[in-house]
């Protein structure tokens, strides 16, 4: 017999009832009129005001001082998390920080930095930011900000951001040291809006394949994407690979606008529906820039929400090829609700459905370890074998052309490409996560900066620069000094990955993302598979 469903609020209310019971017992043994009044008030109250009454009792009678605001926030957060994995409370401070990447800008001086040997080094000035306008260059060392020392003091990333960020229009005086100059120099920077880009990189491969990597869906995403796509078309792009791997999503409208560029007029993009929200459909208009170009979209287990909307729309309309591994499975619509103290709720009000009717959301609830899903997929072998993907055969749907696609959580790729684990070793992990490989790449780039720049562009670097055995030996020597040693056979097994990553990171320190991805894409199995399939079919 089916068990009756239990509201997710019941455990919370039971907990609060227990708290109330403790106070009631105290009141019944105390001749205080206030205690007896509280007893009758609680006994006769309903669920709507019980929480407030319990909090008031705690505030008035609890044995120790209580931070009431913190307690309220914990109760709200706990209540929302019992509803589903994606409804949550966000404090005013957290909300400001969370909005920056989606709003598309923040206030500061506009540099990408790294801390190398207790020194803050500019990796690149942000295009369109105040530092770029003043001529600050990659490789510049930031020694002081408004007289406060920033070198050799165990400085952290948060320290740097606290010193360099500030309200737009405010000033900060920065002391810099530039390689090749005998002494440092000082600049006064007026903080301003610094763009946070959604397009990490766009480039054109030699065979006419365009590549655009999106890292978020923000207010500026659609405009950034159109600019990148138009530039690639002008350079001769014949087909496009859109990389949404690791893209956790963002704004629904940004996903709809992006999908609209690929789909013919009237095509369904996505629809939403919930208990209190009638079905709402979103369809393509007639002005898409890329309706005809051969298309592949790359996804993996880190592609979520808005990324899944775009991939699902393209797949269900048979508009392009989905390549990679099954996506995350986040298909709940959160409505943002501001509260009077500048905090907010993000409350799930509906679900996303692909054009064929698939729910993107993976299962959650009692007995399901939602947060452990990715580890479970890995343990089950899903990242290595298409046959290991858990497909719910009862959730069969059809694309516009009649192809079978499955629901049950996430978007299943049309073309599965396993994770490449051939070069993985503990030594490789230690080099990455200790920061040793990145630090060494910076030192090589910094020492050879002018010679590398003279190569002309990232393509020339990719073709001509060689990470030789001597360079690998230097890296290994630095690692040894930090207590990082390869196990038997680990250096040999990982040498190919180390060589590639080292070269890519050297390129990033000179040319930014263009250099970095220009190197990595040459051995990116998912990208290469998509490019080859598009070339065959177009």
Image (cartoon, rainbow, N blue to C red):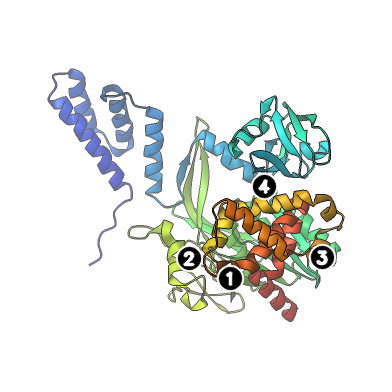
Which is more foreground, mark 1 or mark 3? Answer: 1
Q: Give the residue at mark 3.
A: 464
* Residue located 66% across and 75% down the image: 529
Relative side of 493 to 378, left or right: right
Dot 3: what SS?
helix
* Residue located 77% across and 30% down the image: 189
Q: Quadrant of residue 371?
A: bottom left
Q: Mark 2 or mark 4, which is nearer the start of the sequence?
A: 4
Mark pair 1, 4: CA separation: 43 Å
Question: At which x and y percent is residue 348?
Answer: 47, 50
Q: Mark 3 or mark 2, which is nearer the start of the sequence?
A: 2
Dot 4: what SS?
loop
- Per the rendering, the mark at residue 219 is 4
Query: Can see residue 305?
Result: no
Mark pair 3, 4: CA separation: 39 Å
**As rendered, which of 381 and 223 lies closer to the eye?**
381
The relative height of residue 237 versus residue 453 in the rendered view (above or below) is below
Q: Quadrant of residue 499?
A: bottom right
Report the quarter where the C terminus lies.
Answer: bottom right
Query: Can see residue 222?
Result: yes
Q: Mark 4 or mark 3, which is nearer the start of the sequence?
A: 4
Dot 1: what SS?
helix
Q: Mark 2 or mark 1, which is nearer the start of the sequence?
A: 2
Mark pair 4, 2: CA separation: 27 Å
Q: Give the residue at mark 2.
A: 409
Q: Mark 4 or mark 1, which is nearer the start of the sequence?
A: 4
Question: At which x and y percent is residue 171?
Answer: 73, 26
Mark pair 2, 3: CA separation: 45 Å
Mark pair 1, 3: CA separation: 24 Å
């Amino acid at each position: 017999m089916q068990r009756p469903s239990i509201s997710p609020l019941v455990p919370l209310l039971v907990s609060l009832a227990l708290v109330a019971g403790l106070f009631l017992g105290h009141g019944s043994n105390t001749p205080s009129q206030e205690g007896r009044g509280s007893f009758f008030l609680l006994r006769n109250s309903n669920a709507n005001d019980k929480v407030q009454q319990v909090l008031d009792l705690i505030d008035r009678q609890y044995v120790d001082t209580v931070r009431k605001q913190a307690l309220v926030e914990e109760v709200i957060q706990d209540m929302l998390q019992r509803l589903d994995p994606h409804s949550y409370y966000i404090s005013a401070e957290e909300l400001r920080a969370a909005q920056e990447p989606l709003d598309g800008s923040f206030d500061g001086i506009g540099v990408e930095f790294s801390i190398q040997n207790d020194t803050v080094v500019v990796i690149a000035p942000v295009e369109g930011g105040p530092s770029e306008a003043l001529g600050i260059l990659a490789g510049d060392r930031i020694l002081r900000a408004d007289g406060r020392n920033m070198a050799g003091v165990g400085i952290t990333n948060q320290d740097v951001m606290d010193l360099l960020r500030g309200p737009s229009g405010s000033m900060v005086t920065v002391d810099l040291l530039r390689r090749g100059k005998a002494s440092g120099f000082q600049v006064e920077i007026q903080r301003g809006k610094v763009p946070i880009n959604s397009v990490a990189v766009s480039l054109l491969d030699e065979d006419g394949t365009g590549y655009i990597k999106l890292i978020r869906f923000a207010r500026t995403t659609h405009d950034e994407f159109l600019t990148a796509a138009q530039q690639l078309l002008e350079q001769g792009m014949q087909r496009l690979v859109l990389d949404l791997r690791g893209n956790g999503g963002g704004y629904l409208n940004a996903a709809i606008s992006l999908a609209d560029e690929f789909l013919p007029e009237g095509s369904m993009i996505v629809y939403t529906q919930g208990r209190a929200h009638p079905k709402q459909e979103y369809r393509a208009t007639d002005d898409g820039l890329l309706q005809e170009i051969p298309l592949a979209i790359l996804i993996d287990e880190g592609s979520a929400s808005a990324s899944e909307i775009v991939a699902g729309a393209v797949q269900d309309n048979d508009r392009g090829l989905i390549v990679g591994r099954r996506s995350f499975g986040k298909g709940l619509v959160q409505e943002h609700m501001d509260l009077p103290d500048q905090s907010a709720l993000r409350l799930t009000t509906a679900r996303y459905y692909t054009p064929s009717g698939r729910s993107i959301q993976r299962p959650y609830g009692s007995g399901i370890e939602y947060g452990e899903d990715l580890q479970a997929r890995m343990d089950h072998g899903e990242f290595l074998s298409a046959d290991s993907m858990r497909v719910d055969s009862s959730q069969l749907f059809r694309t516009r052309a009649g192809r079978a696609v499955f629901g049950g959580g996430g978007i299943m790729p049309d073309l599965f490409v396993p994770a490449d684990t051939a070069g993985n070793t503990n030594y490789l992990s230690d080099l990455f996560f200790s920061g040793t490989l990145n630090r060494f790449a910076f030192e090589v780039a910094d020492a050879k900066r002018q010679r590398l720049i003279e190569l002309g562009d990232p393509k020339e670097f990719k073709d001509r620069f060689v990470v030789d055995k001597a360079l690998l030996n230097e890296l290994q020597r630095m690692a040894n000094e930090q207590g990082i040693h390869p196990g038997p056979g680990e250096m040999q097994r990982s040498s190919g990955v180390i060589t590639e990553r080292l070269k890519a990171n050297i390129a990033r320190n000179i040319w930014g993302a263009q250099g970095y991805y220009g190197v990595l894409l040459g051995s990116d199995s998912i990208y290469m598979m998509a490019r080859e399939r598009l070339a065959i079919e177009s």
